[in-house]
Image (cartoon, helix red, strand yellow):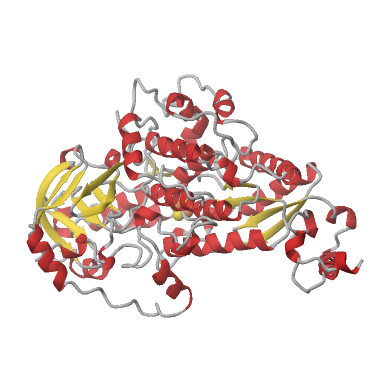
Amino acid sequence: MATAKRRSPAASKKATGLRQGLATYGDAGFSLFLRKAFIKAAGYTDDALDRPIVGITNTFSDFNPCHGNVPDLIESVKRGILLQGALPMVFPTISIHESFSHPTSMYLRNLMAMDTEEMVRAQPMDSVVMIGGCDKTLPAQLMAAASADRPTIVLPVGPMLVGHFKGEVLGACTDCRRLWGQYRAGTFSEADIQQVSERLAPTKGTCMVMGTASTMGCMVETLGMGLPNSGSIPATHSDRLRIAEATGKRAAEMARTGGPKPSQVMTKAAFRNALTVMQAIGGSTNALVHLTAVARRLDIRIDLEEFDAIGQNVPVLVDLKPSGDHYMEHFHWAGGNSRLMKEIRGKLDETAMTVSGRTLKQVIDKAEMVPNQTVIRSARNPIKPTGGMAVLRGNLAPRGAVIKHSAASPALLTHTGRAVVFDSLEDLAQRGDDPSLDVTADDILVLRNAGAKGAPGMPEAGSFPIPMKLARAGVKDMIRISDARMSGTAFGTIVLHVSPEAANGGPLALVKNGDRITLDVPKRRLELLVSTAELAKRRKAWKAPPPHPGSHRGYASLYFDTVLEADEGVDFDFLGSAGAKR
Ligand code: FES
């Protein structure tokens, strides 16, 4: 009938497989005919095209060596899908690598999230497997999954194996920064740094310390968005291919049953569980920003005070770099994230549902109990008695700042010092190593205009180097305060994500050389010891930095016009939940 043939795309919403989401030609029957005619050019039969469809994101890129195993994972996921009688369809999305993204990978995270969301929405698929791993990719995919709300399983690519150099175990990228610091200080030779560059990242996969990629792998499991163990199996191990096959099988089941959807898995309880695990693993500070962005997509607010309170009750139990001694492959062989959750199960909501179809309780019950392992400690014998991160407030950070105190120098956690201010990353590059710089080890280094708008892209510059003359004199750590982020693999007494950022006129913009600043982590305070009247005077005189070159057009224009602060996840203001207003 003509009326049936002319159904609008809206009327075809309940269609499945190839029949859903037709291109708009004003004639649904013609749209489906045309779609089939074109896909048959690839040799598909009607039998194949009548199956439920599982999309698979292809994030392989020559510019993303962390994702080097993606082609193998795709083959295994496909096998799992076919074994369940569904049809796999692979499609490309943006892929982002930390060191191949200018100005920063964070600048592009929201673009990847938008690309992934829209491609999932636009193309006919009943469920989707999102394969990611390098720092910003899992966050972008979780954000996309939350917004598209189509049944989704996330499959991390897995961590790389450790490297070795002169009898020492190397980890990317905790040792990247440590050894580069020694090279800068003149205690590590040119030949050695050259050889280290060939051994720091010895296999495909993501950084193998508890940095952002590993933390987000654990978050994927804890949120219930990936299968158990999928966050920690090494990238190059055959188990990684088996879990890819299992992921494909489960995605095919989800394509048939239509669920669970991300909004049914990533609930308030699931996010609370994730924040609890983040503290217990001594996770990356970046993950807090990312989880905030993902939760915002679902109208769930991550409360920084709640996160801090969780940390005061949850010990760090995982002995991994940079807070401890081991690496992700050791964490995996000790039982991984499920085993860790077993140690803190009393603090988790075990009724939370996971994409495996099991509750978190059922996942935890099945955790592998490895005898005599020393990587995942018990609560009676923790690495640190309280969580890895703390939230600071004060007149220098009215909307909050974060410190990873598990990776800081205990002696500096309560300290008052003189501010030495760098106005931007360029200023830091020009003056940071100047032998005439007026700086001592007791001073507090302040870097501003390095936030989401200021830099732009909130670079991982918060753990900026100790001034050369002090580094050469043996100073290993100083308090550093900024509106930047830092790599989850970094070490030091580093206050990050100061909000509001300086480029938006936050108090960080008002600090002057010689001002005194108090950091008091036990009391969660960050105070600029300058009178309110003086600060008001400085605010009156403050001028916003000039626009960045190129910021008037394209993606940059969208970014600068709409990007939010760190405490809101650095997402774009228009990408909240479906019902949210800008
Ligand atoms: Fe890709 Fe570290 S650079 S995870």
- Quarter of the figure that contains the C terminus: bottom left
Residue 121 in the image, given as x and y percentages of width and height: 65, 60
Say left or right for 416 vs 344: left
Q: Residue at x 53, y 59 (%)?
A: 113
**Image coordinates for residue 49, horizontal then vertical, percent:** 84, 56
Q: On the image, which quarter does residue 91 sit in? A: bottom right
Quarter of the image that includes the N terminus: bottom right
Give the residue displayed 47% in from the left and 33% down from the top.
330
What residue sits 16% from the left and 64% below the top? 510
- Is residue 13 rendered to the left or right of residue 579? right
Q: Which residue is at the front of the view, 488 or 361?
A: 361
**Quarter-of-image position of residue 381:** top left
Judge from the rendering whether residue 85 lies leftward or rightward of residue 371; answer left or right.
Answer: right
Residue 399 visible in the shown view: yes
Residue 182 seen in the current view = no
Side of 45 where 54 appears, left or right: left
